[in-house]
Image: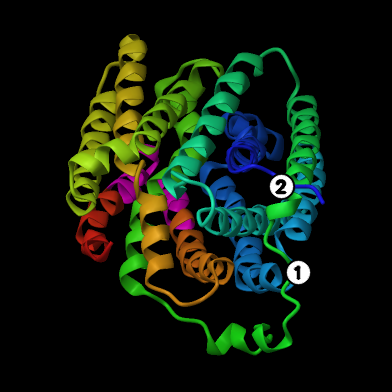
Amino acid sequence: MRTISPKSEYRQLQILFFVFAIFIMAWVPRFPEVKANLGLSNGQFGTLISTGTLGALASLFFTGHIVHKFGTKKVILTNTVLITLVFISIVQTKSPALFLVLNVALGWGISGYHIAANAQAFHSMERVKDLTISRLHGIWALGALCTAIISGLVVDRIGLALHIGGLTVAMALVVFASVYKLSPVLVKANEEKEEHLPLRTLITSFRVDWLVSGGLLCAVFLEFSTGDWSAIFTKERIGVSASLAALPYICFTVALIAGRLGANRITKRFQLYHTVRFLALVGGFGFIAFIALAVNTPFEHKYWALAATCVAFAFAGAGSSLMAPTFYTAGNRRSNLPSAVLVGQMGVVNSLAIFILKACVAWTAQFTGSLAIALMIPAFMLICAAFFARVLKAD
């Protein structure tokens, strides 16, 4: 019977999170091209891209129970295939209607992989010393950074379809290899009938921890908005080239990685509650200040405006760095449900709110004519995350 050492298990988990980031973030710096292919306005594109939340909601609602019943292996591999096929198709379509269908399917696949990978991480924490959700999320951010840099370098050299299609196929092969190596320790299908969570428990077991869910929503929405709008804001508002438009996202991700990978050292010196409050306030207000500076810089000094934009998103990344893993860990400790089910339930609430808020940001940009004003919504939400941080005192 094959076995795997804790060290190798940790390494393969890091690969799963690293590749997941490349999967879902590679096309973000190329959103201006996707938007141009579809021929849509900011408001229309923002609304359309947010429809992925519909698929995510359905996946979040069911996948936790699917993982509990069938194990993480089948869920990760099935959703990997789905994500790959969708990405190959979605970057080639010029039809908003087809994009809508594909984006909903993409939302399902991404959420399904997310739930299974995080459930496996919580399961592995019982065996692997020093394994933390913060560190794995930091590895995810490192993958996002790498793919953002690569996308920025190839945007003028490789076509959108070849770049994204080829990359996703390569990453799918890596996932299959990693899952094979992890097979001995993957969460197995639940074969005990008395321990099954019947379908009816989708309703009866659903609980909302408002402190955790509210904090998570406020904490991560700026991260979502950065992925959706940073390249478009930099290219269209600041007026730089497509390759330079990826820089603010890269700065955001570097700050995010630094915070998450340094989480253990930070929390040993400072109380987690105070650290999260400090980061939320500094990150939110710093983002607002430097975005205001960027949009008020004369156009002939656009590279100074670009620098201010990069600093703004660096503040956002630092402020967001510990948020998602910290609130997920808090939720897991406060619940008696299996981790896969809990991650799914938290995601349902989060995704439904994000779907509405993404549309609010998109149409605020459309009606005001200013994406900078629209980005104030997630910035103020990050500041509000400081008021939910008291839930972390229990940790």
**Are the two marked residues, 2 and 1, in contact with CB atoms closer than 8 angstroms?**
no
Which residue lies at the image location 65% right of the left edge and 56% below the top edge? 107
Question: Does the segment drawn in magenta span residue 179?
Answer: no
Left/right placement of residue 245 relative to residue 53 reads: left
For this rendering, which residue is in front, 319 or 355? 319
Question: Does the segment drawn in magenta span residue 372?
Answer: yes
Q: Position of residue 136 (x, y in %)?
A: 50, 42
Pair 2/1: label in front? 2
Please, what is the dominant secondary structure of the magenta stretch? Answer: helix
- Magenta stretch, residue numbers: 359-379
Which residue lies at the image location 34% right of the left edge and 45% below the top edge? 322
Q: In the rendered view, tell whether residue 24 sits above or below residue 391.
A: above
Could you tell which of marks 2 and 1 lies nearer the N-terminus?
1
Using the rendered view, name the quadrant where residue 36 is placed: top right
Disc 2, SS: helix
For this rendering, which residue is in front, 107 or 258? 258
Q: Position of residue 277 (x, y in %)?
A: 20, 50
Q: Position of residue 300 (x, y in %)?
A: 33, 9
Left/right placement of residue 112 relative to residue 169 reads: left
Let me know if residue 274 appears in the view.
Answer: yes
Label 1 crowd (10 A; few <14 / some 14-19 / many >=20): some
Q: Amino acid at mark 2?
A: Leu
Q: In the rendered view, tell whether residue 51 sits above or below residue 349.
A: above
Left/right placement of residue 359 relative to residue 52 reads: left
Mark 2 to mark 1 CA distance (whole Å) = 16 Å
Using the rendered view, name the quadrant where residue 389 is placed: bottom left
Residue receiving disc 1: 70
Q: Amino acid at mark 1?
A: Phe
Q: Position of residue 80 (x, y in %)?
A: 76, 48
Residue receiving disc 2: 182
